[in-house]
Structure formats: C-alpha cells, structure tokens
Image: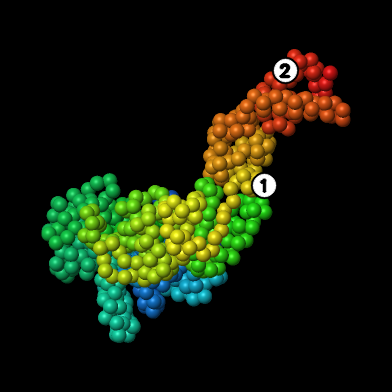
Amino acid sequence: MKKLVIISVGYNTAHTIYEQLCNILYSSVDIKYYYSSSPPPTNLEVDLILYSSEYAFERINFRPANVPYIIARRSINYHEIGKLFKLPKYSDVLLVNDSKDSAEETILLLQALGIDHINYYPYYPGIDNYPKLKIAITPGETEHVPGFVNHIIDIKTRLVDITSIIEILTHFDILDKFANILSAKYIQDIIKLIKTGNKLLKDSSKMKERFKTVINNVHDGLIAINKENKISVFNPIAEKIFAQKATKLIGQDSENFLDDTFFQTVNNPRKEGILKLPSHELLISEIPLYAKNSDNGKLFVLKDVSEIHRLEESVRRRLYQEQNIARYDFSHIVGKSPALQKVLSLAQKMAKSDSTVFIQGESGTGKELLAQSIHNASNRSSGPFVAINFAALSETLLESELFGYVEGSFTGAKKGGSSGLFEAAHKGTLFLDEIGDAPLPFQVKLLRVLQERQIRRVGSIKVIPIDVRVIVATNHNLKEHIKAGLMREDLYYRLNVLPIKMPALRERKEDILPLAYSFYKKNKPLSLDAKLYFSNIKTCLQNYSWPGNIRELQNVVEYLANICPNEPPQSSDLPEDIKSEIFKTPNDIIDLKEEIFAEIKRCNTLRQPVGRRSLAHKFSVSENKIREVLNVLHEENRIQIGFGKYSLKVI
C-alpha cells in the first residue's frame, strides 16, 4: 500500500489534516502524521510527503532523498464561519495563529470570502506590537491566544484545499476512483452550508448576500490535464468561466478545447500569465500534478483579475491602517532626572483622560514620543494614532487632509473621494504637531470641529460624527502668537486643557550620558563599551547647551560612531558647534593653562601621579591640547617635564 506522511508544526493541524484525508482515502493509502515535538524518524519509508504549510516546510528539516512532496494549500473551515457573522460591524479582533505568515494568510482568506465587516489584527508567538483586544479568532490555535482575551472564537483548523487533494489523488493515480466521492463530499458540505446559512441569515438579506459570496468563492477555477493530455478535472467555477459543462469535457483531449493562446499564457519561467477573454481577464497559473514533475500532468488555476485587484486593495488598506500605530510607550523614554520624572508622572495621569493634552517644548525634546506614550497608556491604545505636522502642509492641503473630500470637490480630487485624518483617527488619537504653524483661516474650522466633534468633508453637506482624543504640540510661545495676531485666543484655550511641558536637554543634564549610551548601543557593530567610549568627552557633553536637544545629541553620537568607530573620541573629535561653544576665546585657553598648573601643583602636594592622559581625561580635552599647554608652562619655567607617572613637577 502506498504511504503518505503529513508534516506539520503543531499537533492540532497534523491531526485534523490526517482525519480529513483518512475520510477521503480510507483504505487506499497508508497515512501517518508527525509534528515539531514528535518528528518523523530518519529511516521512515514514504511515497509522498504533505507539508501543512510553507512554514512547516521551512521549520521541520525532514527531506528524504528522491521523495516527492506537496506543500498544502489550505482553505477556511467553512462549517465554522457562521460564528463570525454574529460579531457586530467594525468589531476589533485578534486573528491568532502559530506564525506571522499563517495569521496574515488566514486574514486574507476571510476577507476574500467576504467576511470583511471585522477589523483583524494579526497575533502570533513572538510578535512585539499588538493591541490588547477582548476578542480573538483562531483556526484551532487556542493555545497561542493571549491571557487578556475574554472571548475566543475557534473556527477550527484550516482544511486541505481541494486543489491539494487533487494533487494527492493524481500522484497516487486514484483520482478517477475517488472523483465521485470527493465531489459528493463537497456537494454535501455545500448543502450543509446552505442549510446553516438559511437558518442564520433568514432575517438579513445583506448577510444572505455575503453567504452567497462565500459559496461562490470557495475555490478558483480548476482545470487538470493528466499525462495522456486529457482533461480530468473541470470544476464548477471553470464551467462558469468558459460556459461549458464538465460532463462534456472530462476525458477529452485538452487541445480540442484549450487553444494555443491558453498554453502560451503560462509558457514562461514563472508559469503564469494573463489571459484576456471577451468578458474578463484571468490570471492563469500552471502547477505540476506530480511534485516538480509536469510530464505526468498539469493543474491550471484560474483567478479572476478583478478579484485580485480587490484583494490587493484590501491588503493596501490593512497596511495603511498599520502605519497609524503608536510604536512607543513610556518605557522608551530614557532618563531618571527629576525634571523628566515629574513630566512622566503627570503624563501618565493625563493618559487616563480623554481631554485634550497640550505639549509644549523646544524642537527635538521628544514631544511626539511623549504623545505616543500617552496614547498607548490610554483607553484608546487599541485604536489608531494619527499624526499630522502643520509645518509640513500648505494651507490649501490642510482642510482636505484633515477633513477629507468628496469626488469632484476640486481639480485632481480622487474618484470616489477620500476620508481625512480625523476619520482615520476615529476611536483613537489625533496628534496635531506644530499647532502654532496652523494658518488663521484654518484655525476657525479646527475650533468648530473640536467643539462640535463632527466634521464635514470638503465639497459635502453631510456631517460625520467623530470620536477622537486630541493631543497637540508646539515649540512656540502661543501667548506671544496671540499678541501678534497669529493665534486665535479661543482656540488656544480650547486646546490648553491639560498642559504639560517637555524639558529641554540642558534642564535635565543627568540624562545626557544615559541618552548618549542608548543611542551608541543602536549603532552596529559596537566595538567598545558605551561608558568607555564616552569616557574622554563626557564632561564636554554635559557642559554643552544642546540647542537642538535630544535630536542633536542623537546626531552627534551617530557622527562620532562614524569618525571614531574603534576608539574613544577625544574632545578634538567633537563637531565644531560643540567645540566653538566650550572653547570660545583665547581667554578660555589661558584659564585652561592655569587650571592645569593648579592641578599639577595639587597632585605634587598630595604625592599623586599626574600625566598628559590623566589631565586630558579630567579637563575633557585632547592629549595634543594638553601637550601644547604643558610646553607653554615649561617655557615659562613654571614646571618640569620628565618621564613616568610623576613626570610633571611644579618649579
């Protein structure tokens, strides 16, 4: 008897596929299954290997020589999806699976079946950033559901798709034997789905239409040609595409029905191409019926190009939503200074409120980092975080960007119109950066939106209610702006509900070195310990005023890591802006000379060693600069220069 082995990452998947195939193949094929914690023996004899997924193929290293294999295509377990129709529209759920690819693939499959009234967020072992939601959907991977989830919807393990089952049957040359049984099982499943659907959707014509979409999208069009070049499979979707009955075509030579244009479409290294028909376009893919051997038969998968475009748009929409995520929280803010800790304590209290937060601070102090942290500590953390910088947009674009527009509202308006950032931030947080740069005419409209909590798209008369938490930031003194006529006073007081000021870096000098260490550790590869790397210049860093704040410090660290990659930098290696401030005038050199003389005298009195290196370290200047000063003192006959640890002596 022929032997088939199923290889999967987890037990549940392996066992489910085993039961599915046993139900179809029963006594014709000997089936065994293995998974990551129970791998197959190295001496296992097998005629065909079925990997449950690409992930299983890559993770489980079981590759017997000269044994063909199939990587299963998997479909949603349609018996269980009725549970999902009970979820309210726009429900936010985690889609839990055992890997990133599996989670994202399951989301796309559900959306392709028309179950797109739910907002899916992928979750899998090892993921870093994810919303803490109360509902989770999983295809049989309940052990991976995080503990904070209250409601788990298990739609059961995904089953092997009919296309892969056909590959298996064809490999063992038993397709004809099981074709009727296979067809009967799928028809039986469809009948069960119809019965279930009629019961679930009897009071909802809209849900009924969605259920029809599920039935119509169970499979793509399939045409299989065996090694005798005869058509062996022609499924209902293919019947619809070509307006032909399978009963008429099964067993016929493929050339009698499919012309050269069809075969030329896939005559390329990728084995796929676009075929244009009078009514629509098809993406045709050619797959060997036998693993990596097209001589014994081929399977052609037909996909409607318009459906591919719909899926592509769905993926783009999901990727766009992922961009509106706050990636930082309070743990990412480095520093232990009292000034910073006071701000963080206040911000954590503000996070619990829905009131507007007004962040003031100089450029580069980390205002957006604080805004993201407040969002992630709030009750809106599972919602979007949408940021807009008023300094980066022209006045003509502001209104359409924030409020959206309808089709034809202005030249160049996208067909169908577009939603704005206020709508994108619904149920989340809208961060308005550099609010002091907002033009006066727009300030009137912004004030109205903040008061009414509703927007009207450009060119529309329809009012759209919004639920957003607003955080604003500025590096200007807005009271001075009010006096100068650049800021509306009523808008200022509408925004200034929960004021908080981000301290400048010069006001939190205790945090300069920890920040520098943190930035240095992000540069790869690292050759030195961070504290050792900055040992010669730490006084310089602490004495500099940092007008560009944290952003300037980050740039300086990156600059030093590039010009001094393998040794600690000296003060002479610092950028000119820092050197010109710390060593401003010739008087500074004179003061340095006197300080060095005093230090040598002190060390002589206490019988302590003193040399160029220790002086350079103490005064945060290069050894060359110390050498110059020592030579001047020597020429003035004030010190003697010798050798060894006690080489410098006051005369």
The crowd level at tag 1 (other Cα within 10 Å; few <14, some 14-19, many 20+) is: some
Closest to the camera, between mark 1 and mark 2, is: 2
Find residue 462 and report its horizontal and vertical position in percent: 28, 70
For mark 2, give the secondary structure: helix
In the rendered view of the protein, which quadrant contains the C terminus? Answer: top right
Residue depicted at 15% across the width and 52% down the height:
261
Find residue 21 and report its horizontal and vertical position in percent: 39, 69
| Residue 487 vs residue 651, the one in the foreground | 487
- Amino acid type shown at disc 2: Val
Residue depicted at 59% across the width and 51% down the height:
503
> Along the horizontal axis of the image, is 517 left or right of 634?
left
Q: Quadrant of residue 568?
A: top right
Residue depicted at 60% across the width and 46% down the height:
505
Residue situated furthest front in the rendering: 483
Give the label on residue 632, or none.
2
For mark 1, give the secondary structure: helix
Mark 1, residue position: 510
Find residue 469 and report its horizontal and vertical position in percent: 46, 65
| Residue 545 vs residue 296, the one in the foreground | 545
> Along the horizontal axis of the image, is 140 left or right of 24?
right
The tally of labels here is: 2
> Along the horizontal axis of the image, is 245 left or right of 517?
left
Find residue 412 and report its horizontal and vertical position in percent: 23, 53
The alpha-carbon separation of the residues under discs 1 and 2 comes to: 35 Å
Up the image or down, 332 lies above or below 8; here it is: above
Up the image or down, 582 lies above or below 55; here it is: above
Residue depicted at 62% across the width and 29% down the height:
584
